[in-house]
Image: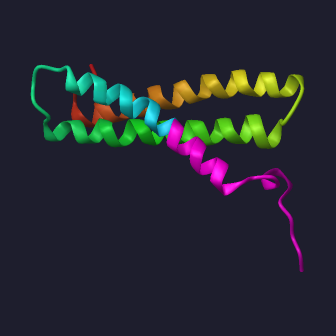
Amino acid sequence: MKTEIDFLKGIQAKSMLAAGIIGASIPLSWLGFIILFKEDVFEKWMLIPLTFIPLGGIFGALFFYLMAFVWFPKGTPKLIAILFSTLLYFSAIWLSAVFAFSLTGDWN
C-alpha cells in the first residue's frame, strides 16, 4: 500500500534546515546584542529567553519556508504567502518572547 501526502511533497531537508537556522539566528543575535551591551553580567534567568525566543524563530521560519517555497511556489499566491508568513514569523517571535519573559516573571 502506497500513500502520498501531497502537501508535504517537495520538501527538501537541507533547505528546511537552512531556514530553521536562519530563523533562529535572527532573534538569537538580537538577544546576544542586548545582553552584551547590558551593564549587568549574564544571569541564569536569561537562559529561558535565550532558549524559547529562538525556538519561536525556528517554527516561524519553517512555516515561512513551507508557505513560500513548497505550498505556493510561484505567482501572486507566493507574494501573499510571503507577506502572511512574515507576519506570522514576527508573531511567533513575539509570542515566544511573551511566554519566556512571563516564565521568568519579567513580563508586566
Which quadrant would residue 81 be assigned to in this image? top right
Instruction: Write the start and end of the magenta stretch as one range.
Output: 1-22
Q: Is residue 87 above or below residue 28?
A: above
Total marks in image:
0
From the viewer's perspective, is 44 left or right of 3? left
Where does the C terminus fall, quadrant-wise? Answer: top left
Residue at the limit of the structure toward the left, as seen here = 40
Residue drawn at 82 percent across, 55 percent down: 9
Residue 62 position by quadrant: top right
Nearer to me, 37 or 51 = 37
Give the quadrant of residue 27: top left
72 or 12, which is in the foreground?
12
Residue 14 belongs to magenta span: yes
Image position of 7 with respect to 91: above or below: below
Which residue lies most toward the bottom here? 1
| Residue 60 screen position, x and y as percent | 57, 36
Pinpoint residue 89: horizontal percent, then vertical percent: 57, 29
At x 66% / y 35%, what residue is drawn?
64
Q: Using the image, determine if residue 21 lies above or below residue 64.
A: below
In the rendered structure, the answer to whether residue 83 lies left or right of residue 7 reads: left
What's the coloring here?
rainbow
Q: Quadrant of the N terminus?
A: bottom right
What residue sits 27% from the left and 22% below the top? 34
Asked if the stretch drawn in magenta spans residue 68, the answer is: no
